[in-house]
Image (cartoon, coloured by chain):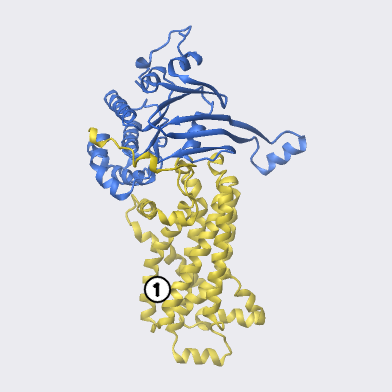
Chain colours: A blue, B yellow
Amino acid sequence: MSTSIVVDNITKEFTLRYHRTFKEVTVAKARGVKTSDKFNALEDVSFKVEAGESIGLMGLNGSGKSTLLKLINGVMRPDKGQVLTRGRIAGLIATGAGFHPQLSGTENLVLNAAILGMGEKELKRKYDSIVEFADLGRTIEAPVGHFSSGQRARLGFAVAIHVESDIFLADEVLAVGDKPFRSKCMKKMLEIRDSGRTLVYVSHSPASVERMCSRTIVLEKGKLGFDGETKAAIHYLEYDKPDDDQELSDDEMGNDI
Amino acid sequence: MTDTVATPSTPQEEQPLSPPSPPSGLIAVFKQRYLLRLLVQREISARYQGSFLGLIWSYINPLSQFFIYWFVMGYLFGAHKDTPNFPIHLFAGLILVHFFNETFNAGTRSIMRNKALVVKMAMPREMFPVATMLVSLYHVVPQVVVLVIAAVFTGFSPDLTSVVCLVLAIAIIAAIGLSGALLFSAANVFFSDFGNIVNVLTNFVRFGVPMMYPYALVHERFGRFADYYLLNPLADAVIIFQRAFWYPTLTDADLAKLDANGKVVLPDHLLMHGVLALAGSLVLLAFSQWVFSRLENKIPERL
């Protein structure tokens, strides 16, 4: 098997600015207050993913999961270290990004597909099955601005999932769709996993990560906390401990399945 | 449905491991022509979506400006007397000024406006300023058609030089407008003050080019310093545009009269000035691209 993603000692530094206007900055400087702070969103993270492997990515809010995906996706570049990938990358990272509220669903579909890297021919081949998957009926001719958030998510998801790729990044809780659509999406995700593509799956739901991935990486405040079997990762995060107060199961919350 | 699952695009062994960052730079933008075309189409169709008059608004704005200037400059200040076919002179200048200001203004805001895409999608970010420039260019076409019709009614006799001048003038404005848009769109991400600076700069443009006044006046007042006036590539482009549309509407009698009054209608070596201005604009464009690439890295996290 060949390596699909190499993350090699990457560090990504963010600058936090407390004051933005000229007035604020001058006042702060005069008082000797710090005007900006640097912190590492990711610090010295390394791992490798083999082709065809599906890994889960877990961690609390703000632990750097999305930043890591952006670095793998190529939107951001690391300050130190390097990220290497093999083949085309697609995913549920920006479903519906760039939707223009005034244009119709079909117009947005075409544009969104192009933004996600689909060529003209590829789109022509898949257009019908995208429309079928989104299953929006005649609503698809209406301006996207009139869509409900669920309908918008369906269209975005339908396009994203049809993009050809070698690496698939999923960073979205499918909490907006209705139940039939969510199970359709989950089926599709499993199909993707079994099609031999590399999958990186971000989720807060232990059940779905366990179902999708055998290996899971846990980020803790930007550092690699754990890398290994999913069950152990969930245990490491203490997501398997019952809460003191009444906890709702995944299914009860309607989250992620 | 199973056949719709996208398959790995190519056998994996063929592709090398490489950094995932998208190719950047203007060249990469023009390699992705399909996406660029769709972005331009989106802008054009979204701009007048839900408006009853639609594309007609693209005419109303410059035409209203035209009538204001025509009345104030031509009638109140008496430019009609000094400059033959002053309305053509005015409208020709206005088209280019409008093209430049639109490119510069909208281009500067383009990255902020497409925030959602910039922070999430890996694509050359020069795409957005370029798309804005092309949208502005698209709106130039109908205005030029109106100008040609007006010129024909005032005795337009174009020659081959007119065509060369038209292309040259548009190319200069496109290059310099795009370089301004690139430079300021990246800077605007860091401080939105740059968007306001653009507003101030565009105010100068109307008065820095021979639109409301003829070049002859510049030559008359500035004397040998008129050469410095010609260092402004925008002014060069507008004079060249005047050569393409306004100059061919002048009759021999008009020219003789202007000559007798000692007026220099057009500067010497006009085309050479134009080619130099284009070269200068391209150098500026290369510089803007360089700055843009340096700032680009920090753009996603500052949005």
Please indicate, yes or no, whether residue A114 appears anywhere in the rendered image: yes
Mark 1, chain letter? Answer: B
Quarter of the image for residue A166 reads top left
Provide residue A90's location: percent of width, then percent of height: 39, 38
Is the residue marked by circle 1 packed among few (<14), some (14-19), or many (20+) residues within 10 Å? many
Query: Residue A159 versus residue B221: which sits nearer the camera?
Result: A159
Query: Residue B269 versus residue A239: which sits nearer the camera?
Result: A239
In the picture provided, is A82 more to the left or to the right than B137? Answer: right
Residue extending furthest toward the top = A244
Provide residue B242's location: percent of width, then percent of height: 48, 77
Please indicate, yes or no, whether residue B202 appears anywhere in the rendered image: no
Provide residue A236's location: percent of width, then percent of height: 50, 15
Q: Is residue B89 above or below residue B197?
A: below
Residue at the image position 56 percent from the left and 41 percent from the top? B302
Q: Mark 1 points at which residue?
A: B147
Residue at the image position 43 percent from the left and 79 percent from the top? B162
Quarter of the image for residue B204 reads bottom right
Count up the numbered dots: 1
Provide residue B223's location: percent of width, then percent of height: 65, 82
* Quadrant assignment for the N terminus of chain B: top left
* Quadrant assignment for the C terminus of chain B: top right
In the picture provided, is A162 more to the left or to the right than A93? Answer: left
Q: In this view, does B138 lie above or below A140?
A: below
Please, what secondary structure does the residue beneath circle 1 have?
helix
Q: In this view, does B223 lie above or below A121?
A: below
Query: As shown in the figure, which amino acid type bears the numbered disc 1?
Result: Leu
Query: Residue A158 versus residue B259: which sits nearer the camera?
Result: A158
In the picture provided, is B105 more to the left or to the right than B33? Answer: right
Quarter of the image for residue B298 reads top right
Q: Is residue B297 above or below residue B214?
A: above
